[in-house]
Amino acid sequence: MPAGEEHKNLETVNYLWKSFLENGLDRKSTVIALGGGVIGDMTGFAASTYMRGIDWIAVPTTLLSMVDASLGGKTGFDLPEGKNLIGAFHPPKLVLADVNFLKTLPERELISGMAEVVKHGIISDPELFELCKNGLSWVKDNLEAIVKRAMAVKIKVIEQDPYEKNMRATLNLGHTVGHAVELVSKFDLRHGEAIAIGMAVEAKYSAKVGLASQSIVEAIESTLKKLNLPVEIPNEMSHAEIIKAMRVDKKKNAKSIRFALPVEIGKVELIDVDDLEDVL
Amino acid sequence: MPAGEEHKNLETVNYLWKSFLENGLDRKSTVIALGGGVIGDMTGFAASTYMRGIDWIAVPTTLLSMVDASLGGKTGFDLPEGKNLIGAFHPPKLVLADVNFLKTLPERELISGMAEVVKHGIISDPELFELCKNGLSWVKDNLEAIVKRAMAVKIKVIEQDPYEKNMRATLNLGHTVGHAVELVSKFDLRHGEAIAIGMAVEAKYSAKVGLASQSIVEAIESTLKKLNLPVEIPNEMSHAEIIKAMRVDKKKNAKSIRFALPVEIGKVELIDVDDLEDVL
C-alpha cells in the first residue's frame, strides 16, 4: 500500500476495500495498520466503512503517529479540494506503540514528530515541556518516557471531548498557521516543521494581544530550536498566500478563525481572530 | 442525483461529497434525502463520512423505504463484487414518512413494498399480518395504519439490536432466498417481489424441517397472493444459479448459511442450514 500524503485519497481507500475483499475479510476480521499517520488514517477509514465497520489495530511506526495520529479515532482521506474532508471517528481497538520502530526513522522525521510532543507539553504538561528542553540527543536516549507522556496528554484531551465539540480544539495549537505554511510550502516542509513554525508565530501573536508573556514566547522558541525545529516563516514565503491558505477549509462566510493560543506552559485558550494579517 | 440500484456505487457517493462541498456544507449542516431506499442509503453514507459525519433527515417516498430502509441506520453502497459491501451505521436524525407520497407511486412499486409489510407481520405482529389479508385495494385505503404498524415492528427490532448482533437477523426472513432470486433475475424482479418468493420458499422449507405447520405456509402464500405478489420461483430460473447466488457474500469457508424461518405468525427462528439444495 502506498504511503505519504499524496496517496491519502479515495483511490487508495478503494484499493484497500478491494484488498479486504480479495483476502476474504468479513465482519469479524481485524485489520492491522503498520506505518505512519497516513497509513493509519486510511486503514482506519477503510475499516470503519468495510461491511459497515470492522475492527482495526494501529501499530504506529513514526513519532508523529505514536503521539498524535493513532490516538483519537480520527480517520479519513483528502479530496482535491482539501485535507481530511471525508472521514469517520473509528478508534483502533488497540494502539501498539513500540519505540524501537523510532530507531529506524530518518532523523528529520523524528525531529518533525517532536513538534507535536512540544505541543502536548504546552497544552497541558509543563513537565514534558521541561524534558524537551534537554534537546535532541537526550530525547533520543529517552524516547519511551517522552512518548508515554505525550500520548497521555492526547488521551486525556480526547477522553474529555471525543467528537471535538470544544476542548479538543486546543490540540490545534500551532496548526492554524502551521497547516497554511505546510500547504504553501507544497509539503516541502514536513508536518512537524510547519507546526513548529506555527507554534512560534502563534505564541508571538498571543504575546501581542496580551495573553502570554514574552518569556513564554522565548521558552517555546528556544525549546523548538534545541530540537533542531524551525521557528520562522521561510523568507521566500508570501504572507498573503499563507493568509489565503488559512481561510481554506473554513466556512465561506466565516468572519473569524478560531486559534488555540498559549497562555502559559500547560495552558491554552481558544480565541476567535478577525484580522488574520495581525497574526503574521 | 441519479436513483436506482445501478447507481448505488462509489461514483454517486463521490458526486454527493463534491456537491456537499460545492454547496458549502460544513460540520453543522444537515442533508435531506428525499426519495426511495437507494437515495437514503447513499445520502446517509455520504453524510456519515462528510467531515467525519454530519446529520441527515430521511424523507422516504416509497413504501419500501418507509417501512424498511429508512429505519435502522444502515447506509452504504455496492461494489461490483456485491451489494452493500461498504457502509456505516448512521441513523437519520428524523424520518418523515408521509403516506401521501405513496399515492404517486406506480402500483407495482407499492405492491413490492407490501412484501416487507407482510414480513414485519410474520416476524412479530400477527394483527398487521391479518390486516394484509384484506388485500390490495383495502390496503390502498388504509396506508397510514399499515405504515405505522410496519414501522413499529422494525423500530422495535432495531432498538433491541442496533448493530445486528443477533435478533436483527430475524429481519432477514425471506431474504436469503429472495436476494438470490433478485440477483439471478438480474433485477427484473423488484426487491419486494423477490422477497415474497423468498418468504414462500422459506416457509415451505420451515414446514419441511418441522418448524412450521402447513397452515402457516398456506396463510403466508394466500396473503401474498391477495396483494398480487408472486410466491413461486420463475420456471426459467435455474436452482443451481440461485444456490450459487446464496453463497455469494458469505465467508469462503462457511459451511452453513443462517436462515430466519417462520415458526408461527409473529415468531421467527434463526437456523443454520448446511444443505442449500434442500431449501429449493
Image (tube, coloured by chain):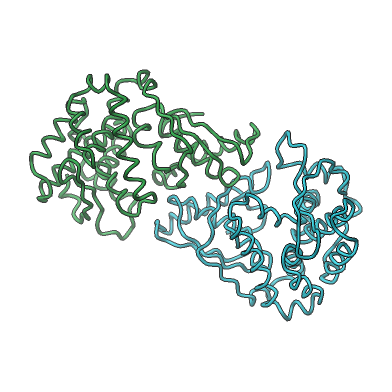
Chain colours: A green, B cyan
Q: In the image, is B216 to the left or to the right of A156?
A: right
Task: From this view, report whether residue B5 is shown above or below residue B86.
Answer: below
* Residue at x-position 40% and y-position 56%: B27
Where residue A212 sits in the image (x, y, percent)? 12, 46
Where's residue B106, x and y in %? 73, 70
Quadrant position of residue A118: top left
* Viewer-nearest residue: B44 or A151: A151
Which of the pair B161/B142 is nearer the observer? B161
Extreme residue toward the left, this view: A214
Q: Note whether residue A87 is visible.
A: no
Quadrant occupied by the C terminus of chain A:
top left
Q: Residue B223, located in which quarter of the rendered image?
A: bottom right
Residue A226 image point, x, y percent? 17, 25
Residue that protrudes farthest toward the bottom in the picture: B141
Residue nearest the observer in this picture, A64 or A180 = A64
Question: How many numbered discs, if any?
Answer: 0
Tell me if I can see residue A222 in this picture.
yes
